[in-house]
Amino acid sequence: MRNEVKVAITIFIAIIVAVFGYRFMSETPLFGQTYQVYADFDRVDGLLSGTPVYMQGIKVGTIASMGFADNDSIRVYVNLNLPNGLPADSRAVIRSVQILETAIVIERGTSPERLPSGSKIPGFYDEGILGAVTSLGEEIGGNVNESLDKLNSVFSQVDGILVDGGRDDIQQTLSGLNLTINQIERTLAARSGEIEEAIVHLRNTLANAENLTADEDESIRNMIRNLESASARLDTLTGSMDEMTGDLTEVIRKINEGEGSLGLMINDPSLYQNLDSLSYNLNKLIEDVNENPRDFLKHLRLFSVF
Amino acid sequence: MDILHDFGRYCKLLYQAIRSSTEIGTYYKNLFAEMIKTGYDSLPIVMLAGAFTGAVLTIQTAYQLVVSYIPLSTIGAIVVQSMVIELAAVISGLVLAGRVGARIATELGTMRVSEQIDAIESMGFNSVSFLVVPRVLASFFMFPVLYIAAATCGILGGLLAGIITGQVPMADFMKGGREYFFAWDIVFGLTKSIVFGFVITSVSCYKGYYATGGAEGVGKATTNAAVLSCIYVLLTDLLLAAILL
């Protein structure tokens, strides 16, 4: 084989490998024309050439290229593996498809009309969960900054206190406390004998009290039994008194109502009047007897009396 | 001073090559012969180097990415992008610096010390057009071919290594690879391969064309050509990355 033929075949094969390799890696059809559409977006955060394009959850293509459009928006060209093309009312949305992965999602329309290759579809940017998380993060970041500012202020105040003589005060307090502790230690060391003695006495006293309680245990029990018995008798007595009170109440009620002799006697004024009259007559009789004893004694004989 | 002298002679040689690049009739036959030697014959070694680089890259990346929250597709993304942007061009460049650079420097150096170049000149041929232009021009055509072969084999090798070792399933590898596969990366890789081809062949031609001192001089020129080609490949790699990325 001639050198020219060898070279030609080598270069030809290299070109074929390069072209097919590029189309294979770019996920464009190896043969035939690519179905390409484009959309304009205000922003394309996280997108690169080659980023997957999804439709109804499956990957249908990749981003071919991106660049600025005439109206300062970002124009994104998308290669799609859709043999039947896209419905005319389809649209492209940039949104998070996983936690950290942003992609273009094609929302398929319902129109029976199909878009030819090279058409424009409307593009939207959807912040989604990532946007919400970002805004939350910004909010939290603000709060954290605020807290840090406050903490900083507190620290500077503490620092100020320490610098403005506060350190001396704290040192004095600590040295005073130290002194007090030393004094307490010394006192405890000096009086340890007495303290131990007091503890021994207290222990003895407690033991005595315990013994006393044990010795007089029966007496105390008897006393308690007597008290219980007295208490029971008191209960009975209280019951009797209650009954008596009831009876008395009944009697007084009857007296008040004028029932019975006593009631009549108290309530009937005629008895009083009779008694009053009787008293008056008796007075009168006694006066008569005093004034005229003969009238009453003339019929009396001494012997009859004695 | 020697550096400036060398640089001046190098620029002069390049100028002569560019000026004589219009003499297609002179170098036509040599061009295809060089394309075979530079490109076609180098394909196996470049493909092997690419495939093993991709395979090792996959296994080592999988070994390093032990954190559970990093998806396996990241390995595919790293391997594909590394091969396309950097490794396919640089690995093939370094391999070819040894293989092609050394061959060119030896061929031209031997012709120089055995006075064949002087004979060509004495016959009225333009030796630069006859010897240098086809070699440099062949690299323009064949280095991109070798880059494509290295990148393709590297990606396939990485994919195969991931599947065989069970560390990266094919779906994850391809998902990551496709996600970070950009047209500009290929343009960048192809540009690098063309620049590396030019650097390797031009430096080797210069070292061989101006070789002196008999067999020893040829050996020295060959060593210098291979070493300098490697160094300039790495330097231009850095420059291109700084300028183009």
Image: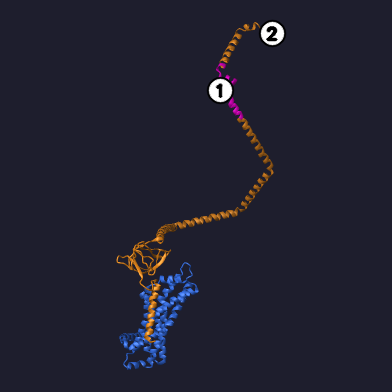
Chain colours: A orange, B blue
> Residue tagged by mark 1?
A257
Report the span colored magenta. A243-271
Q: The residue tagged with tag 1: helix, strand or loop?
A: helix
Secondary structure mostly seen in magenta is helix
Q: Earlier in the sequence, mark 1 or mark 2?
A: 1
Q: Is residue B8 above or below residue A50?
A: below
**x and y percentages locating residue A148 in the rendered image:** 42, 59
Q: Is residue B150 above or below residue A304?
A: below
Task: Decide if residue B86 is in sight here.
Answer: yes
Q: What subunit carries mark 2?
A: A
Amino acid type indicated by mark 2:
Ser
> Residue tagged by mark 2?
A304
Amino acid type indicated by mark 1:
Glu
Describe residue B65's horizontal placement relative to residue A74 as left or right: right
Instruction: Please give the name of the residue rendered at 64% of the width and 35% of the height, measured from the top-left corner.
Output: A232
Locate the N terminus of chain A by quadrant: bottom left
In reply to whether residue A250 is colored magenta, the answer given is yes
Describe residue A230's horizontal placement relative to residue B169 as left or right: right
Q: Which one is in front, B41 or A45? A: B41
Locate the C terminus of chain A by quadrant: top right
Q: The residue tagged with tag 2: helix, strand or loop?
A: helix
Q: CA distance from mark 1 to mark 2?
A: 50 Å
Q: What subunit carries mark 1?
A: A
Q: Which mark is residue B63?
A: none
Few, some or many residues within 10 Å of mark 2 (<14, 14–19, 20+): few
Are the residues tagged 1 and 2 within 8 Å (C-beta)?
A: no
